[in-house]
Structures are given as structure tokens and as C-alpha cells.
Amino acid sequence: MSDKKAEKRAKSQPKYQVKNALVNYYLVLIFTVFPLFFTQQYSNIRHDKLNLFLVLSCSLIIAEAFILIFTVSNQRKEVGLPCEKWYRRLNFTDCAFGALVLVYLLSTLISDYPADSFSGIQGRNNGLFLLIVYFLIYIIISRFFKFKKYVFVLFAAACIAVYILCILNFFGIDPLEMYVGYGDKIIDNFTSTIGNKNIMSCFCCLSVPLFVIMYINKSSFFSGNLYLSASGIGFAAMLCADSESGFLGLIPTMAIILLYSVRGIYRLRRFLLTVACMLFWTKLLWIFLLFSDGLKRDLGAIQRLLIYDYKTLIALVFVSSAAAFLYCLSRKNAEIRPPKWVFYILLGVYGALIIAAVSMFVYYTFVDTETELGSELKYFRFNEKWGTHRGFMWIKSWDIFVSSGLKNILLGCGPDTFYTAFMPYFAELGERFGDASTNCAHNEFLNYLITTGVFGLAAYLAVFGSAIVKAFRNAEKNALAFMLILPVTCYLIQSTVNLATPITTPFLFIFLALSQAVFRNPQRKL
């Protein structure tokens, strides 16, 4: 009886076809070759990544287009009836993405710099053309992706290579000779095969949460240990990148994963093991630093706390002991689950922490503006110096927006043309902070508001907001979709202090598409 059911189920599942295989081969290349690819050290790394992404993506688009044309033609010949209307399978996220492309198009057409808006050459190449490529790749992956474990196993292996290079660079070891010919400023601010340390932190935000959640869910011995290793080494790489933006994204995402994990002992135990692995790597870095004579790094407050403070060692012992206790507990009763009140208490704690953080931010920003704040508290006072003068750029960006005409308020000054909009403030930026210019607001949401207006930002939020809400609401029913949306969530949080770039943003849209693909065609578990 069971054999017949299995046979019936197998027949009901769509076959793994060439169009599906092409998507997975494309993902393998994006997940392995793309992060490691470079040609001229750091001097051309953004364009190296952009060109490779365009070559791979356009190849997939053309191949899938030919397959689609021949498939539709054969279906009409065999059936003699028109195929199902394409628009009947659109969901809200699809429509919102289409609206975003339309806003980009209108913004480009009415911009004073249409050529720059199309190419994004003034900024980081995030113009209309690249968004169209993202949209087409999103459509293809969200329709044709079928889960294959090897895709994510290879991604983990490639990421470990990127992470290790970052750690080696931190200790002055340069196996790829990326720093040859560069001065101290580049050596201090660029790392691995990714580039700027902020971009490296962003890459960690797009990869580490995925490996954490994949390890927490049931996986094989080999893949599970690979994901666990990638989580720990990736966390160490984020420490070595020394950019607070990564922690801004990772800490809330880990809090979300903990909420998901407390619904089962197995998940919770694996979550604790992942945290223990991360803490172990902080102490490993500390040991390496002890034996690295002459290495002097001006680390940020969070990095110093995690690497040097004895409290992290206490936390490591506590978390490891808790994981061991849960393991013993689950051996006696494999089906045991934490009571529901644990979940709600955790939610209450999160709420209290958020209220406390907001209260401190308001107090030190608007009430007590004189008291000297230590390195751990300095982020609770917003002014023009906040976040390596991001505060200055945000305040002036808001002034630009509110003083714009109706056209720019609604549709912006043109995709990725922030450089031109901010030009009146370059002299002040250079005089006060030493930067001659900037081509982004260092806050993606504010950047979208300036360059694509209210309509562009609203469409962008609708695309990702709808996908995240749907994945979170169905986390138990469709764990794979939830797992694939976590990198998107982490990216968006850290993007409040970071920037879009062809080095990392392609992963944002790819994970969005993968999550939507799992909803569109439910697939087997890990």
C-alpha cells in the first residue's frame, strides 16, 4: 500500500527538467565562483563581480527564454489550446516587484540624468539596467528552482574559503597577494575577495544566518557539520572585518532564530551549539592575537568585548552546558517540547529590550546631549558625527528630500544618482570629515527615497515586506521558505547603515526568489 502511495506521489510531483537543472547550475556558479572571483586585486573588484554576474545571469535568461519558447510551442501543438494566462500565477510580491521596475523606469525617464540612471555609473551600478536583470532572474528562479542539497553545501564550502581569507588577512597573512602595492588605508579597510570591510560584513549577513538555520533544522552528519563550521568561521570573519553594520543585522536575526528554535528541544539544542561554536571562535581569535607579535588592531567596541572580555568565556561554558543538558533530556524523550510560555516570555524580553533601547536613544539624543558616552553607548546619541558621520549624510539627505519638488518627492532624482543630489554638501563633508564626496546615503532606504522617491521606496518595502511576512507566518508549515528568507531579513536590517552594491545585492534578490520558489512549488525538507 505504501509503495503505491509513494508511486502516486512521485507521479504528482513535477519532473526535474532541464529548466530546473539550469537554475541550480547557475546558483552553484553564483554561490561558489562569484564570491571568490577577482582580476586586479581590489582596484576593479566591484566591476569584476558585476561583469561576472551579468554574464552568468544573461546566459541563464537567454537559455531559459529559448526553453520557454519551445515548450509553449510544443504544448500548443500537442494540446491545441492556449496555455494558462501568465498573469493568473502572479502573487503580491511579483506585482510589487513589477511596480518597482515601473517606478525605476519612470524615474529614469524624467531624471535630469537618464543615461546615468540607466547604468548607475554615478553610484554603484545600481541603475535601471541592473534592476531589470534582478527582476528577470527573480522570475526564473521563483518559477524553476527545485531544491538540491549540493547547491547549499557548495555555497557553505565557498563561504568558508572567503571567511578564512578574511581571518588570514586580519592577521597580516595575504595568500592571494591582494595587498601587494597598496598602502595601509586599503589594507585596513579591504579584506578577502569581497572588498571593503562593510561589504564583507554584509556578505556575512547574507550567508551566516542561512548556515545557522540549516544546521538547526535536521540535516545529514556531513552537511550539518559543514553548516556549523561555516556559522562559527563566518562569525569570526565578521569580527575580523571589524564593521558594526554586520552585528546590527546578525544580532536581531539570531534573536528571530531563537524564537523559532524554542518550539522544539532538537532545534534549541542545535541553536545553543551554534552559539557555542561562535563564542569558541571568539576565544580562538583571542589566542591567535596573543601569539601574533606586533599585530595592532583598533577594534570596535563589540569586537573587543567578544574577543577579549572574560564574560564571553563564561557564556561559552554556560551555553555549552545548556546544550549538553538538552541533549540528555531529549534522549529520554525525543518528542519533548518546551512549554508555549517560554516563547511568549522571550517575546516579552525582546519587547522590553527594544523599549529600553529606544528610550535610551531618545534620552541621549534629545534630553541629555552633553554627558560623555563610552564606546558601548555612543550609538544611543544621534548627531552629525553618529556612525562615522553617517548622521551628517542622513540629516542632509533628508533636507534634500523635503526640499525637492513634487516630481523628485514622488519619483526621485533617478536610480543611483545620489552623487549628484548630494553634490552641494561635498565641500562641508570634506572640510568637517575629510571625505571629498559620496555616492550613497549609507542607508539603503534613505537612498531609495532620494533616488526613486516615495513610490520607489514603497514598492521596495512591499516586495521584501510581503515575502518576509509570508515566510514568517508559515515558518512551521514551510521551514525551507523561512530558512531562505532569513538572509534577506538580516541584509535589510544591516542595510540601514550600509549600501547596495553588485558584490552583495545579487544575493538579496536570489534569496528572495528562492523563498518564493519554495512557496510556489513546495519542496522536500533538508
Image (tube, helix red, strand yellow):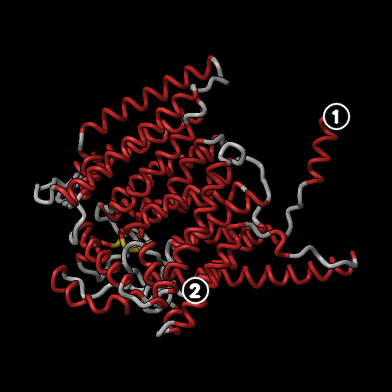
Q: Quadrant of the C terminus?
A: top right
Left or right of 298 in this view: 346 = right
**Which percent across, then down, holds residue 489?**
45, 50
Distance, label 1 to label 2, CA atoms, is 56 Å
Does the rendering let one see residue 21?
Answer: no
Residue 10 point in image, percent of width and height: 79, 43
Whole-percent x, y for residue 224 in the image: 51, 38
Which residue bears the numbered disc 2?
104
Q: Position of residue 266 (x, y in %)?
A: 51, 27
Residue at (18% x, 60% y) in the render: 385
68 to the left or right of 456: right
Q: As drawn, which residue projects farthest toward the front? A: 406
Drawn side of residue 411 relative to residue 148, left or right:
left
Judge from the rendering whether residue 324 lies leftward or rightward of residue 267; answer left or right.
Answer: left
Residue at left 52%, top 27%?
264
**Viewer-nearest residue: 208 or 263:** 263
Please tell me which residue is depicted at 37% across the width and 49% down the height of the picture. 249
* Residue 256 figure quarter: top left
Q: Which residue is mark 1?
A: 1
Q: Amino acid at mark 2?
A: Tyr
Which element is circle 1 on?
loop
